[in-house]
Amino acid sequence: MTNNTRRGLWIAAIIGVVVIVTCLCVAVLGLGGLAFIGLRRGSAGESATAQVVQPPQQEASQPFATLEPPARPSTAAPEFPTTALGPGAQETLSTLQSVQIPYADLRAQAMEFLGLSDIPETVAFPSEFDAGDANTFWVLNSDTNRYRQVDTQLAFESPHVYFWVEKGLTYDESALRRLGDEFENKIYPTNREFFVSEWSPGVDGDPHLYIIYASDMGDNLAGMFSSADSVNPLAYRYSNGHETFFLNADNISLDEDFTYGVLAHEFQHMIHWYRDRNEETWMSEGFSELAAYLNGYDVGGFDYAFLMEPSTQLDTWPNDSGSNAANYGGAFLFLNYFLERFGEGATKELVGNSLNGLESIDQVLESLDATYPDGSTPYRADDLFADWTVANVVNDPSIADGRFGYTDYQMPFEITPTASLADCLGGWQTGSVNQYGTDYIELACSGQRTLQFEGASEVDLLPEDAHSGDYAFWSNQGDESRMALWHSFDLSHAQGTVRMSY
């Protein structure tokens, strides 16, 4: 960026007071996947349905030795004027902050609600397979949300991979071997280096991961990981009982670069699910794109999509899988920025942190004792977000302590200002921006100017008002989580039939 274009960019980064986790889980199995959009190589969107969870007790996250943030020159922390919340908003915020959302434990739910008892956490010890062996798996169509059983044949094996191909599919055997070798020798160790380990030996007691190449998985789907496959089939009948991810033979070829990135992406989902069962979708997807990038694969144009739409809200995920390219890009860029700022150890800690979303970033930065360069002001997720919005437009790590640019990632182009204001005589300009989204406004005025900004300090939690009064029941929402409403009623004196309407 030239000095001329730097002259007048005003960053309006509006951070909502109450940030809501979106992407309501509506089914019982968890999917992390890639779908196609109209960006380079058919880039990815989200496979989107819901999520489940449950293998054995998760291992405690191990501490990492080098978690010190880089030294920073002495620069005072910025001061932002704030507006006090109203009593209703403060009560709502306090309630949300006090809630502990449990992850969805499918095995426990099956025993609690289906009358099943003593479901083992793992299945029987596995058999060893050789090339040419046959096996049958459940495969989900993401468009219809229906399963079918697919007969497959083992086409490739290595110390950590069984690669199964649906019978009847035509495929390039040498391309499959190259893909399998690349996963075994590059993707597997790289992902484990940055994100630690999947559940191994896993639900089946076998260190092999299952890759299934099958058809009829959905018109826009490229690949998918389903956490339901890491559950004992006694708890969920469609579980394959192995650590599994899928490649859609209808949409991707085994010899294209995009497919390699899909495997890195889906393997990160598998690792992240094991380390943090109910992580927010935006963060898990961002880390999966980061996994593809760290393995040397193109991120499919998602960074382009976000840089063209920087007002996209960072910490949310749309339900429409055809409109989430910018969400993938924003999450990838933000987490890559975190990695460049705080290093590999902090990134591992973030993946395994039991909190979710921005709260987990707050906790990791606190564990690092991260502060502004003044050495006393705590540096947290909102501060990281603000610096990142500047880095996306300035992208010059030589400024100050380096926080206003990327050190390794090469931005494909400069952000275009959202608006340009040439009215230098004063007066109000109105507009809107998403929570945790950014508008870049260019001021084409000479000389010194005074800017005054006013923004809403409160937003509605829900798009509906309470049915009556000021309060309403709300189950909350979360990914791979058990959402429920609980209330006790004394019906000891009730007469006749009792009905509940809602």
Image (cartoon, helix red, strand yellow):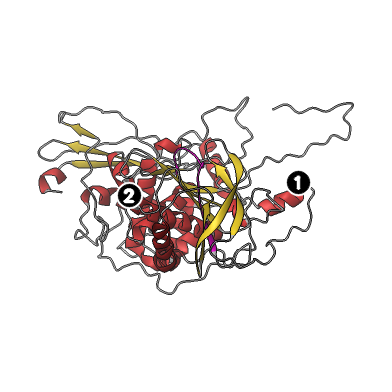
Is residue 117 visible in this depiction of the protein?
Answer: yes
Q: Percent from the top left, x then y, of residue 150?
A: 59, 48
Side (left or right) of 7 relative to 137: left
Q: Percent from the top left, x then y, of residue 16?
A: 42, 40
Residue where numbered disc 2 is placed: 386
Residue where numbered disc 1 is placed: 113
Which residue occupies the extreme bottom position in the image?
A: 65
**What's the residue type where badge 2 is placed?**
Ala
State which quadrant residue 340 falls in.
bottom left
Instruction: Say what secondary structure mark 1 lies in.
Output: helix
Q: Nearer the viewer, residue 42 or 92?
A: 42
Residue ID at (29%, 36%): 453
Q: Nearer the viewer, residue 448 or 195?
A: 195
Q: Percent from the top left, x then y, of residue 298?
A: 32, 53
Side (left or right) of 269 relative to 335: right
Q: Is residue 244 above or below residue 30?
A: below
Q: Nearer the viewer, residue 20 or 261?
A: 261
Instruction: Say what secondary structure mark 2 lies in.
Output: helix
Crowd rating for badge 1 (residues with CA inside 10 Å; few <14, some 14–19, many 20+): few
Residue ID at (43%, 56%): 263
Residue 216 is a magenta residue: yes
> Which span is picked out in magenta?
209-221
